Image (cartoon, grey):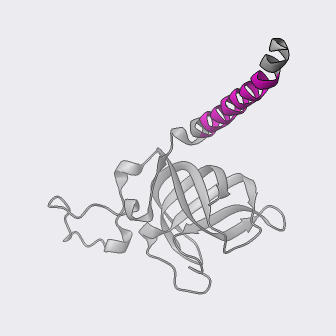
Amino acid sequence: MHRLYFRRHRTPRLLTLAKTLLIGCLMLSSAMAFGDAKTLSWQDLLPELDDTLDLSDGIRWGERVRLDLNDKDVRIPGFIVPLEYKESEIVTRFLLVPYFGACIHEPPPPPNQTIYAVYEPGYELEEIWQPVWIEGTISASRVEEDLATASYSVSAVAIEPY
């Protein structure tokens, strides 16, 4: 009788422990996949307004960039404005913008609030109004497209729904 009681009550504990370990491993692998990338907000793309900023150099505020972000692995949310499709809904080149409708229904944001991105595998864009996270290496490089000019570029390695 003692053995039967032990088996019956031990199994749920083992099952709970196994579930906890599995969830922990999944969270760790997800954190490792995105662990090296610094999460940015759109505000982070703007240079800091401090005493070292020279505003008399003729560069408009909307075109100023942060050079310290060059070659950094970043993760940032936004909305995709497609530029090139691999197939009917697989986007490979796009502009990432901070709000829905930018460049399509509304004027484009300033160049330092627009990111030109390339994602070679392609991303299936089911809903244009769905925000996404993109992850990749950012650089301050100007790209002019018909829809807008971007002051930053990202070579994306991952895209997922927000």
Magenta stretch: helix, strand or loop mostly = helix
Return the x and y of residue 48 as percentages of the image width and height. Answer: 27, 61
Q: Is residue 18 magenta-colored?
A: yes
Residue drawn at point x = 56 percent, y = 48 percent: 136
Return the x and y of residue 81 as percentages of the image width and height. Answer: 64, 72
Residue farthest to the front?
1
Quarter of the figure with residue 42? bottom left
> On the rendered structure, is 51 left or right of 141?
left
> Where's the C terminus, which quadrant?
bottom right
Residue drawn at point x = 78 percent, y = 17 percent: 6
Q: Is residue 89 magenta-colored?
A: no
Residue drawn at point x = 64 percent, y = 65 percent: 94
Return the x and y of residue 86 as percentages of the image width and height. Answer: 80, 61
- The answer to whether residue 31 is above or below residue 94 is above
- The answer to whether residue 24 is above or below residue 68 is above
> Where's the N terminus, which quadrant?
top right
Q: Nearer the viewer, residue 104 or 162?
A: 162
Q: Which residues are magenta?
A: 8-30
- The answer to whether residue 128 is above or below residue 20 is below
